[in-house]
Image (cartoon, rainbow, N blue to C red):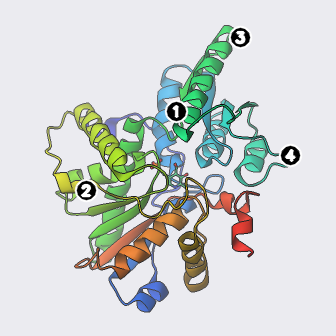
Amino acid sequence: MQLGKVPRIHLGEYPTPLAELSNLGRKLGGPRLFVKREDLVGIALGGNKVRKLEYALAEALAQGSTTIVTSGAVQSNHVRLTIACASRLGLKTYVVLRGERPSVPTGNLLLDHILGAAEVHWVDPKGFATREELARATEARAEELGEDLRRRGERPYVIPNGCKPLHSALAYAGCVLELLEQMRVLDLAPDAIVTACGTAGTQTGLVLGSLLFAQGGIRVVGVSVSAKAEALRERIRQNLQEALRFLGLALPVPEGAIEVHDGYVGPGYAVPTPGMRAAVELLARTEGILLDPVYTGKAMAGLLDLLEKGVLGGAEAVVFLHTGGVPALFADTQFPAFLT
Ligand SMILES: Cc1ncc(COP(=O)(O)O)c(C=O)c1O
């Protein structure tokens, strides 16, 4: 199957802007730095989920689905954007959130309400030993909710948190093609793309795009926001194989093509770190660009450190993927980190 022939519903504004971080680049004195603004994709404060949802929702409509079910953390960007994109298509979204229900909804949760989530169900974190167990239980609750809706006469389509790996891979391979075209106009080509790595779907797509459209010549650097690097590398390897099979391609994936750094997570997922805060403030104060505290702030902390250590040595043009998430800056769990 050709990438361009996979059913997709156009929801975002493309190309998303590409801007040079001139002040930051000058300050650091290293390679030219660019930012690809996936946060400016044009729907409900944007983010990397929109491109993925264009494939997921096309599949949902093709199956004649009447409602969407999805799940995530309390401050899930994925959930916010699923509700927004589904609403655009006239579909209601039922949501399962993992975590304690706050007395006042802030950040993404407030937006979930404004965007019109049909129902929000909660999975209490008490009783789960690990975040992974809680996440699995939340996905299972979403499947149950889907079954329940089916019994109520709906035709639900369940979107896993972060979307299916295949949809993510196709979406971000397409983003690489878009980026190459934007840089070609500037007589440039990206040597490296740096991204936050959560479910690893985005990074899988970027690696796929590098292999498909740049002979693997774009180094894709993932900065984990949660999991260990080895687990993410394995997940990306499997996701890539699935995507290549789907596209009918037998491309070899060089061992070095999958690069994940896990030294910037700090104490855990969504727990603020000094490096994150410094990175968010630096981008805000040099470029007027807001990052988020959970994903792009930690990814930028990683990029800054890797540049300082010379790990990106030899690169002339480095692109930071702004994957969105800014509503979390306004979450009760996050903004205090910036006030001390
Ligand atoms: C703002 C933001 N950036 C990055 C990511 C990570 O993307 P992925 O799950 O594809 O690794 C997510 C989602 O998890 C996100 O919401």
Which amino acid type is shown beneath numbered disc 2? Ser
- Sequence-wise, the earlier of marks 3 and 2 is 3
The residue beneath circle 2 is 210
Q: Nearer the viewer, mark 3 or mark 1?
A: 1
Q: Nearer the viewer's eye, disc 4 or disc 1?
A: 4
Would you say the beta carbon of the disc 2 residue lies within 8 angstroms of ligand 1? Answer: no
* Mark closer to the observer (2, 1): 1
**Are the two marked residues, 3 and 2, in contact with CB atoms closer than 8 angstroms?**
no
Which image quadrant for residue 84? top right
Instruction: List x then y, in percent, for residue 53.
Output: 51, 40
Horizontally, residue 180 falls left or right of residue 95, namely left
Residue highlighted by disc 4: 103
* Looking at the image, residue 146 lies above or below residue 219: above
In terms of depth relative to the viewer, which is nearer, 234 or 32? 234
Label 4 vs 3, first from the N-terminus? 4
Q: CA distance from mark 3 to mark 2?
A: 45 Å
Q: CA distance from mark 2 to mark 1?
A: 25 Å
Instruction: Give the Cα separation between the discs numbered 3 and 1.
Output: 21 Å
Quadrant of the snapshot with the N terminus: top left
Q: Is mark 3 within 8 Å of ligand 1?
A: no
Residue 293: x %, y % from top left: 60, 63
